[in-house]
C-alpha cells in the first residue's frame, strides 16, 4: 500500500519535453513503487506518448515510459533504477511529457512508500 500518491492531470500537452503540471516537494524520503498512466484520448503518432518523472531534474526510470499509439494506458511501468531507490526528503518531483502525439486527458499516478528511519 502506498504512503503517498503523486497525481498529475494534463488535459492537453503544452510544449515538447517540458515540465507539465504541478511540482511536488518531498516531505520525507520515499521509494517509488508503482506508476499508472491513463489517457482519455490515446496517442495517435507512431512515437506514442513518452513521459519522464524527474527527481531534482534526474529521471527516476531505468527505461523510457511510453504509452504506445492506440493504447490508453501503461499500468506496468515499474522499473526504478536507484540504489537504494529513494527520492530524498527536500527533493522536487516533476513530470515531463514528449511529444504530445495527440493524446489528451492524461492522468499519471506515482505511488510512493515512505522509507523507514
Image (tube, rainbow, N blue to C red):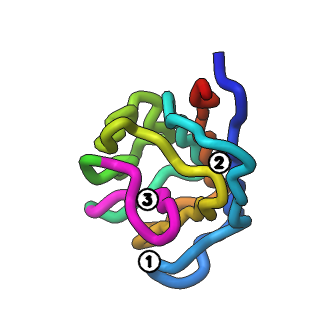
Magenta stretch containing residue 52, yes or no?
A: yes
Residue lying at 28% horizontally and 53% vertically, measured from the top left: 64
At 70% from the left edge and 26% from the top edge, which residue is drawn? 3
Using the rendered view, name the quadrant where residue 92 is placed. bottom right
Rounded to the nearest angstrom, the CA distance separating label 2 from label 1 is 17 Å
- In the picture, the disc for residue 107 is 2
User: Left or right: 33 with respect to 7?
Assistant: left
Query: 54 or 37, which lies in front?
Result: 54
How far across and how far down the image is residue 18, in percent?
Answer: 51, 79
| Quadrant housing the C terminus | top right
- How many discs appear? 3
N-terminal of the pair, mark 2 or mark 1, is 1
Q: CA distance from mark 3 to mark 1?
A: 8 Å
Is 27 in front, or is 44? Answer: 27
Residue behind mark 1: 17
Instruction: Please tell me whether residue 90 belongs to the stretch shown in magenta.
Output: no
The N terminus: image quadrant: top right
Q: Which percent across, then down, holds residue 37?
A: 53, 42
Q: Element at badge 1?
A: loop
Q: Nearer the viewer, residue 76 or 80?
A: 80
**Residue sitting at x 47%, y 41%:** 86
For the record, the magenta segment spans: 47-61
4 left or right of 117 in image: right
Amino acid at each position: 500500500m502506498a504512503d503517498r500518491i503523486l497525481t498529475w492531470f494534463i488535459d492537453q500537452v503544452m510544449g515538447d519535453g517540458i515540465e507539465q503540471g504541478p511540482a511536488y516537494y518531498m516531505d520525507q524520503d520515499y521509494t517509488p513503487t508503482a506508476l499508472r498512466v491513463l489517457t482519455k484520448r490515446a496517442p495517435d503518432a507512431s512515437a506514442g506518448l513518452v513521459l519522464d518523472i524527474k527527481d531534482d531534474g534526474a529521471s527516476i526510470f531505468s527505461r523510457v515510459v511510453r504509452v504506445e499509439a492506440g493504447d490508453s494506458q501503461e499500468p506496468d511501468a515499474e522499473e526504478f533504477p536507484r540504489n537504494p531507490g529513494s527520492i530524498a526528503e527536500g527533493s522536487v518531483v516533476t513530470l515531463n511529457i514528449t511529444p504530445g502525439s495527440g493524446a489528451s486527458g492524461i492522468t499519471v499516478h506515482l505511488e510512493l512508500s515512505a522509507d523507514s528511519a
